[in-house]
Image (cartoon, grey):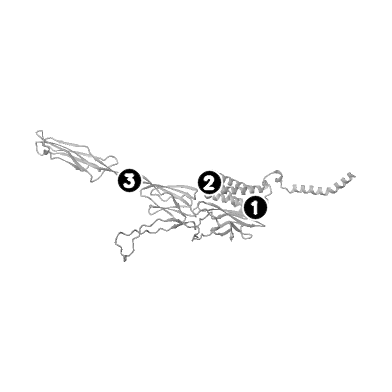
Amino acid sequence: MAAGFLSIESKRLWPAIAVVVAAVVGLLVVLPEDRITGEPTVGDRLIAVRTDRAALQARADGVARLELLEALRVAGLLGDTLIARDEPLRDRAFGRLPERRRQAFAELEALNAALRDALERPGEGARLAAQQAAGKAAAELDRFAAAGDGPVVLSYTPRYVPPRLGTAELNLAPGTSTPPAADSALRLDARRDRPAGPPAPTVSRYVPPFAVPGDDDPPVEVEIVGLYLGGGAKPVLTIGDWRGEATIAPERLRFTVPRSAISSDAARTSFATGTLTLRAGSRNVTFQLLFTVLPDRPGSFAFDQRIHTTELESNTLVSPEILARAPAGETRTVRRCFDPPSGWRFEGGTQRVVIVERLGWVDDVPDETMNGGSVELVPPEQPGQLCLAVIAKPVTKEARTATIGRFETALVRDKPVERVVQSGIRGLDWREPARLPIESGMAEWKLYVRLFDEVDRELAGKANADAPLSSIPFLRIAIEDEGRLMVLSMDPTAGP
């Protein structure tokens, strides 16, 4: 009886068991081959694309946000293009993609690796390697554009969002100071006109937080270049809380973004990301647009000058004593010429002759009055010399004479003096150029610039040279006033 009952129940369960088995078999059939073998899927690679992009942008410092910006933008565009093309195939095994498509992934991975290396070991070589990898990745974008199977963003501007005009700093224009009145009697009917004093320097003051800046920041004009961008609903760009529709032109989209929609730092650059949403067939695709936002204050600088001048050094020269001796009844002259010591010269108008002693004898009886000799300066034999004549001259024919003489003069030379003039640390301003006087006798100079509180650069130059081509981003250097003034101007459009 029990056996019969089990047989009847088993027959009743067979249809249910058959349904379960069919479902399991169907599931095995539906599951992609890679889910069974463990091979990475297209979706896995797309997740890696998003993760790598976020990690690289997060690690970028102030230098990378300037020098590696273009490579980061190319990596973002190629990654978004791959996501737009391959998102519907996310469950497919990556190895089943066409070779051409897998090559695009390989170029993106090579670019990300070069960017990672440039961030970990910054230097000229790593930066050039990243630029080279970006060129190959850009070629992949061109291939996608030529294929014509979906929207492609090839480039977009601007790279750098200009700084805000209404900052928390106010520069007061220089005025003129009035000198105090001279001491005199006070007259009520006297005119109060006084000569203007020297101009006062520009002084920076801080605006209180409740004060509203008078200048309105101009909007940021974003232009996107690509193919198949406006085929469906109007493209939309989102930056922060702002959202706007595109003005569509052939192969271009244009957006006018309020500057206030893009956040800025006071002293450092930052990244801003805009999301471009396009309609491609029955679904939306997005592209992340990367911008570097310039801060309110560009940085600071110091200007050192090495000055070579001369100062007059003076000394007194006393010549050796010269003896002129003459026998009875004869006149003798001893002439000597002297050259100044090396590097020195005799100062004109300071020479003085000295008769040390004048001697005379008559029949061996001393009598200095019998000597009519003298000590005189005579024309030099060579330029720059001093020549002295010592003369022994008897007054009578019976007198013997001897004269001792010398000269004294001032020696002068131009002593080289080297000194350094330092400007001290001064602030740069986006709107007001910094004017630096060049000292007389300047032999060489060095300019130290710290941009955006993170980027340190140096420039050097020599006297009587043209203004150097600035290798410092956003900085323009000019020499004015016939070489007596250096002008430093910050230009938001002069990016690397």
Residue 19 in the image: state x and y as whole percent: 80, 49
One can see residue 382 in this view: no
Q: Which residue is mark 1?
A: 85
How far apart are the alpha carbons under marks 3 and 2?
A: 47 Å
Q: Nearer the viewer, mark 3 or mark 2?
A: 3
Residue that lies at the very extreme toward the right in this rendered image: 1
- Residue drawn 57% across the image and 51% down it: 74
The residue tagged 3 is 310
Q: Position of residue 205 (x, y in %)?
A: 45, 56
Residue 178 located left or right of residue 9: left
Q: Nearer the viewer, residue 490 or 250?
A: 490
Q: Is residue 326 above or below residue 215?
A: above
Rendering coords of residue 294 (x, y %): 51, 53
Identify the amino acid type marked 2.
Arg
The part of the image, by quadrant, that contains residue 386 is top left
Mark 2 lies on residue: 127
